[in-house]
Amino acid sequence: MSVPTVARKDFEDAVRSQMLWSMTGLLVGLIVLIYGAVRYFEGSAPADELAAILALPMQVIVPLAALIVGYMAIVGERRSGSIKILLSLPPTREDVVAGKLLGRAGVVATAVLAAFAVALVLGLVLFGEVAVGELFGLAVATLLLGFAFVGIAVGFSAAVASRGRAMAGVVGTYLVFLGFWDVFVGGIYRFATGAFPPGIIPMDGRIEPWALALQRLNPMEAYGVVASGLMDQQVFPLTLQFPIGVNVVGNEPLEDVVIGEVPFYLSEWFSAVVLLAWFVVPVALGYLRFRNADLG
């Protein structure tokens, strides 16, 4: 029972430290601002389009908030020395890492669900209708995105011994996902095939399916795929686009984009698996470092 105990204590600490309330207030305030602006300037909007509007700001706020929530989860305990007291009790190092992951994920989940509950109410109050299916689909995709970045942050927090290194790790990772991932994949494509990936606006060629799979390993890209599938409308990932990158976006069927048959790993459900992998794998790697770390 040590993991649930650590998770519950961590969640309660987040409540006492205002971490939960700050993130919830930020997301709720964002939704109130967006819905209020649409009501004021437009008067009304189709319910499904109103839900889709939330996808972009959620991609901006939720990953950053999740990284802030998670990056001090373990390294903060090491800096204060409380990790020694915690490990002198029944929890093992594995319990601490798993409990911290679940506790911080609980903070993100509570804030995201509260924000979408407010969106549901505001949609009814201000516009008289709500696209429940689209709003629910976006909420699920946003939860998966938040969990992915919590996993990344807690993984760094477990792997390093200082706040500065943890912060550098999460900030650097976020910047890679935001601005350099497609360039990285484009470079691999150039090395493997002798040419840069074709663009599709307009489509000027087909792309190797493995390159598109590499692109979707970026959690921002995976979020776009999952949210688009669950909402039944296009959600564009928040990434910078470069001419040499893999810029496969839009509504083209994959059969018209990739070379050969569409493999299973380009399915929408596999992108959900990618997001869950980002929740688990970085933490597992961080634990391997933390397991034998000298805690002083």
Image: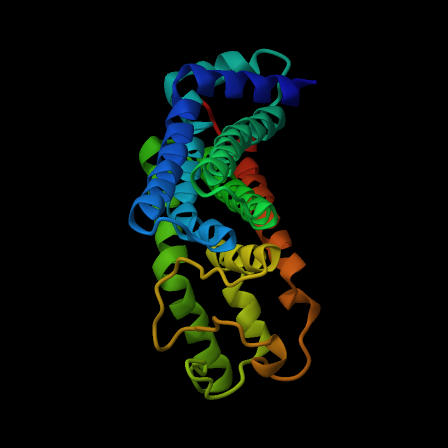
Q: Indicate whether 1 appears above or below 176.
A: above
Q: Indicate whether 294 appears above or below 267.
A: above
Tell me the quarter of the image containing the N terminus.
top right
Depth check, front residue: 180 or 91: 180
- Coordinates of residue 170 in the picture (x, y in percent): 39, 43
Q: How is the image coloured?
A: rainbow
Residue located at (57% from left, 55% from top): 231
Depth check, front residue: 39 or 210: 39
Residue located at (50% from left, 34% from top): 121
Depth check, front residue: 291 or 33: 33
Can residue 62 be seen from the camera position used here? Answer: yes
Can residue 282 be seen from the camera position used here? Answer: no
* Total numbered labels placed on residues in the image: 0
Can you tell which quarter of the image residue 91 is in? Answer: top right
- Coordinates of residue 280 in the picture (x, y in percent): 60, 42
| Residue at the extreme left | 41
- Coordinates of residue 32 in the picture (x, y in percent): 37, 36
Q: Indicate whether 86 appears above or below 160.
A: above
Residue located at (46% from left, 35% from top): 125
Residue located at (51% from left, 46% from top): 145
Q: Is residue 207 left or right of residue 266?
A: left
- Coordinates of residue 192 in the picture (x, y in percent): 50, 81
Tell me the quarter of the image containing the C terminus.
top left
Q: Indicate whether 210 appears above or below 149.
A: below
